[in-house]
Amino acid sequence: MPVLTKMKVLLIMFAPHKAFQMQIGALSAFLKKCGYKVRYLEIIVYTGDRFDKYKQIVKEEIQEFQPDLVGFSSYDMNYYFILDCANFIKNLYPGMKIIVGGHNASLAPGDYMKFESIDYVCIGEGEYVLKDLLESFSQGKSVKSIEGLCSRDDKGKALFNNARDLIENLDGLQFVDRTVDKSIDNSGQLYTDHLP
């Protein structure tokens, strides 16, 4: 089904070092093929860092891009950065929809859904979950039956749907989108002049 409007997705990852994130490239390629606009913000965090250091970067990115959905890629090390950033975004833009995916959120979705600033958690592969979620937004449909998606009922209680089956035909997916990460040139080489 065609996209009614070109909805925009901002993907954010707090990472301990610079590397091309395959999961981000895969999601970006899939969503762009479906007609959505995607932008990626990678924030390199160091031992002892707090999210407060990155508030202005996040604020500027959201103001410039004006996404319909903000998605975080999770793993154990960036848990508190995600929660702090989601709270910051919700305080600035209470209507902004926020989803968390990745292996940490897939293994422990309740650890994220217990916070009101997190609207959704994706369990497992995110390509079709995000597509269905964005289609629901643009068509004004309920998201409560989307497989692989944790959402909330009208009272804010977390709803945990069954996981979606794994994508069997990986050849049917697009190649990863290396253009989504602006610090990598088309050859896949990192631009390192901005790194400490």
Image (cartoon, grey):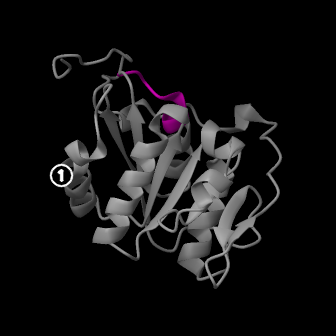
Is residue 171 visible to the viewer in this orientation of the structure?
yes
Q: Position of residue 144 (x, y in %)?
A: 72, 73
Examine the rendered structure and indicate whether residue 93 appears above or below residue 107. Answer: below
At mark 1, the secondary structure is helix
In magenta stretch: residue 111:
no
Region in magenta? 18-25
Q: Tag 1: residue type? A: Gln
Which is nearer the eye, 15 or 19? 15
Quadrant of the rendered image containing residue 148: bottom right
Q: Residues within 10 Å of mark 1 (few under 14, many from 20)?
A: few
Q: Position of residue 165 (x, y in %)?
A: 83, 46
Residue 70, located in which quarter of the rendered image? bottom left
Measuring from the top left, give residue 1's x and y in whole percent.
Answer: 65, 67
80 on left or right of 112: left
**Does residue 27 sit above or below 163 in this rendering?**
above
Across and down, in percent, residue 91 comes to 32, 70
Q: Nearer the viewer, residue 72 or 48?
A: 48
Q: Is residue 97 left or right of residue 48?
A: right
